[in-house]
Image (cartoon, grey):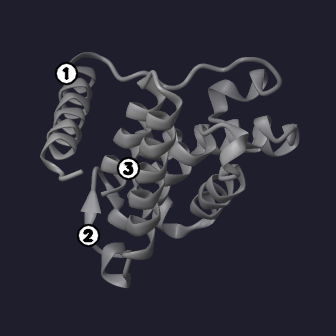
Amino acid sequence: MVHLGSTWLIKARDAWMPWTKLRNVEQGLALIDKSLSLLAPEHDRTLVNGLPVSAWVRATAGITLIGLPDMFKRFDQGRNLLRDLTGRAAAARGGRAAKTHIYYYAGQAARRDDDLAEAAHRLPPGARAHAGGRVRAPRATGARRDSLRRRDDILYRHARRRETLSPG
């Protein structure tokens, strides 16, 4: 559900009309909020890509929320989600790639908030020297990149289909 909310936010970014942008943002934020509210203790035991489902949902929501413009006032919520996640044992159980991704975006959120000390602490070791400058996100390569593209295409088509089928 959190991925569908992120997809609605991507649709909002790419929409032309302002009212369509706002409607898509509201839809996406509602889905993200609902997915966070539905998390239960059993989601800490089920793993997705080496991370517990609860950590995966919180990470996706946090990364999505820190990328929103300031007018939506969701940056603090996203930063807190990522900060809490980096301090949890749940994130420590995940694989290296998942942890690097979470710490990278927690560092980006700290850097955007002008907390360079925390940004240097949160960024992956290879990027710590550049905490004050521009740092690129970790990139997926080969088959993983193709898999991510297919997943994004499927999510986008699903959101478009739901939009065309919904009444009103």
Neighbours of disc 1 within 10 Å: few (<14), some (14-19), many (20+): few
Structural crowding at the residue carrying mark 3, measured as other residues with C-alpha within 10 Å and reported as few (<14), some (14–19) or many (≥20): many
Question: Which mark is on residue 5?
Answer: 3
The furthest residue to the bottom: 41
Task: Give the residue pinned by disc 1.
Answer: 143
> Is tag 2's residue or tag 1's residue first in the polypeptide sequence?
2
How far apart are the two marked residues, 2 and 1, measured between alpha carbons? 25 Å
Whether pointer 2 and pointer 3 mark residues with C-beta atoms closer than 8 Å, the reply is no
Q: Looking at the rendering, which quadrant does residue 140 occupy?
A: top left
Residue 106 screen position, x and y as percent: 65, 45
Find residue 78 and name its label: none
Q: What kind of residue is marked 1?
A: Ala
Q: Is residue 46 visible?
A: yes
What is the distance, in whole Å, between disc 3 and disc 1 at their CAs?
25 Å
Q: Secondary structure at mark 3?
A: helix
First-in-chain label (2 vs 3): 3
Give residue 160's quadrant in the image.
top left
Which is more toward the observer, 136 or 127? 136
